Image: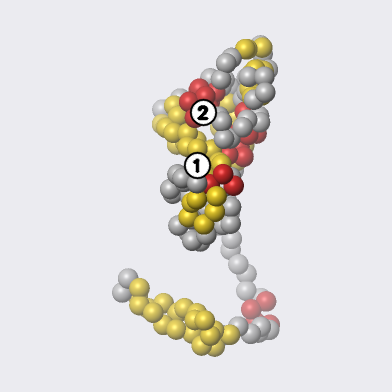
Amino acid sequence: MTNLSVRFWNRVRKLTTTTGTLLSEVTDTALDTVQLDDSNNQQNTEVIIVQQIDSVESVDKYKICGHCSKRLIQAQGIIVKCDHCSQRMRASLCPTKVSASVVVRIENSDRYLFITNEVLHQLLGLYDLDTVETNDLTEKLLLLDDVTIHYINSKVTSIEAKNSCVYLKLTNICFCSVTFVLKNF
């Protein structure tokens, strides 16, 4: 590497790159013999089985930037501007996402977990993100029984339940695995 810069940050010197930094490939046979220990970086998936989700802290519905996929802070109005990449776009063209923060009790301690949009779709089936109400999703999460949760560092990777529902927007019917329930959303 050439054209590097030294900067001070938090009273510590840091070596950084500049716009003129050039990288060149170096073959060093001594580096091939170095053994790396990745045991600290491995993320193990934990699995818990609970009877129910004890509480839902929040269910958030938000828009993301169509360019960089970052969450839009202020998505009101016809035209929105992304605070991350500064792109301006129509709000109607920005995808909508939903996430949930839930609490489950394991051995007399609370575990706070974050459920992403993709995992909610896996659990609850297809639903229209633009028209679904956060209260309906909260209710569905709280009514789940015999819940198996796979997670890494409090982020849920998959979730299964005995009575998960499939939401059909056209007919407003929620089919459960045990019984048929007619509900007006």
Q: Residue at x 58, y 85 (%)?
A: 22
**Residue at the front extreme, as displayed:** 78
Q: From the viewer's side, name the closer residue of 153 and 16.
A: 16
Looking at the picture, how far across and down is residue 38, in whole percent?
59, 60
Colour mode of the rendering: secondary structure
Q: How crowded is mark 1: few (under 14 residues within 10 Å), some or many (20 or more)?
A: some
Are dots 2 and 1 in contact, CB under 8 Å?
Answer: no
Residue 171 visible in the current orientation: yes
Say what amino acid the circle numbered 2 marks. Answer: Glu
Q: Residue at x 52, y 24 (%)?
A: 136
Q: From the viewer's side, name the closer residue of 182 and 100.
A: 182
Q: In the figure, residue 151 lies in which quadrant? A: top right
Q: Residues within 10 Å of mark 2 (few under 14, many from 20)?
A: some
Q: In the figure, residue 57 lies in which quadrant? A: top left
Q: Name the residue under label 1.
A: 62
Mark-to-mark CA distance, 2 and 1? 12 Å
SS for dot 1:
strand
* Quadrant into which the N terminus falls: bottom right
The numbered mark, 2 or 1, whose residue comes first in the sequence reads 1
Q: Is residue 84 found left or right of 151 in the rendered image?
A: left
Q: Is residue 34 found left or right of 137 in the rendered image?
A: right
* Quadrant into which the C terminus falls: top right
Looking at the picture, how far across and down is residue 102, in whole percent?
47, 32
SS for dot 2:
loop
Q: From the viewer's side, name the closer residue of 118 and 31.
A: 118
Q: Name the residue under label 2.
A: 133
Looking at the picture, how far across and down is residue 49, in whole percent?
57, 28
Q: Which residue is drawn at 67% across and 76% down?
A: 32
- Tell me the tag on residue 93: none
Say what amino acid the circle numbered 1 marks. Answer: Tyr
